[in-house]
């Protein structure tokens, strides 16, 4: 298997699948959302064990997962993405050969899981595009909230918690230098991107979306609400800061 690293620090895929994702980047005009791509055999088996613990032994919820011998993630041809919750973005993924292959009418359902089928890729013979340009329109802000020391990548109706110096370095290459913000500045960034305040706490604690629970977007939330009923997410800057006082922040 020939492996290619996805731009933007989004992991790795088998080269044909990676080329498809890079074409999707260009067609979307942004980096396609990738929460999980290629996966090691060790991680696949760990995910499978967590699901079996949930399903058969009453452990905490874990998403449905196959072991290393069956997982398409281990073959580098699967991506977990919140773009599937956005109809326009999902159409672009489908046009480029990706299909949701883990849809079930039970607790195995994974609408975020897509697999690359080259025979369905309408752009497979297109030339490999240059990597998508970074934050030319200043739509993404790397923001460190001075009060808590926590760092986030914030965009329109979306927020990612940055939990390590390595990840911070990769994000700064793409989106520019981190801004150290006081309460006023951080409030402005969160409010101007229409992000509910309680979500800031949830991504920091790993309680939302993505494989580590540290990503949130409105499109993903609306997709979840459509399945489970609308859940109001409210809070304030002061309350979030108070609630995060007991969270160990890596970046400080």
Image (tube, rainbow, N blue to C red):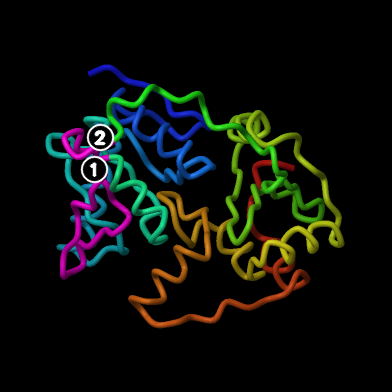
**Residue at 28% from the left image edge and 29% from the top image edge:** 124
Instruction: Please give left or right for residue 26 compared with residue 52 in the image.
Output: right
Going by the image, does 159 lie left or right of 103?
A: right
Q: Residue at x 30, y 40 (%)?
A: 96
Query: Picture coordinates of residue 177 (x, y %)?
Result: 76, 35
Residue labelled with disc 1: 115
Q: Which residue is mark 2?
A: 77
The one of 35 and 164 positioned closer to us in this rendering? 35
How far is the residue under mark 2 from the one under mark 1? 6 Å
Range covered by the magenta-colored residues? 97-122
Left of 145 or right of it: where is 108?
A: left
| Location of residue 108 in the rendering, given as x and y in whole percent from the top left corner | 19, 61
175 inside magenta stretch? no
Quadrant of residue 112 within the rendered picture: bottom left
Seen at 32% across and 63% down, the residue is 60
Q: Position of residue 212 (x, y in %)?
A: 45, 50
Q: Earlier in the sequence, mark 2 or mark 1?
A: 2
């Amino acid at each position: 298997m020939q492996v290619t690293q996805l731009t933007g620090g989004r992991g790795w895929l088998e080269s044909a699948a990676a080329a498809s994702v890079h074409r999707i980047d260009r067609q979307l005009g942004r980096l396609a959302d990738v929460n999980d791509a290629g996966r090691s055999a060790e991680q696949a088996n760990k995910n499978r064990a967590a699901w079996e613990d949930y399903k058969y032994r009453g452990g905490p919820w874990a998403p449905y997962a196959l072991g290393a011998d069956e997982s398409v993630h281990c073959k580098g041809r699967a991506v977990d993405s919140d773009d599937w919750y956005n109809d326009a973005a999902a159409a672009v993924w489908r046009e480029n050969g990706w299909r949701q292959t883990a849809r079930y009418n039970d607790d195995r359902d994974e609408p975020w899981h897509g697999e690359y089928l080259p025979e369905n890729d309408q752009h497979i013979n297109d030339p490999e595009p240059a990597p998508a340009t970074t934050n030319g329109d200043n739509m993404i802000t790397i923001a460190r909230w001075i009060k808590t020391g926590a760092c986030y990548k914030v965009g329109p109706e979306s927020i990612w918690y940055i939990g390590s110096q390595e990840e911070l370095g990769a994000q700064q290459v793409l989106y520019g230098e981190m801004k150290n913000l006081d309460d006023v500045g951080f409030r402005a960034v969160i409010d101007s991107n229409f992000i509910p305040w309680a979500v800031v706490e949830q991504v920091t604690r790993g309680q939302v979306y993505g494989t580590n629970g540290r990503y949130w977007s409105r499109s993903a939330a609306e997709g979840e609400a459509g399945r489970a009923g609308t859940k109001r997410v409210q809070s304030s800057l002061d309350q979030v800061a108070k609630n995060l006082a007991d969270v160990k922040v890596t970046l400080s």
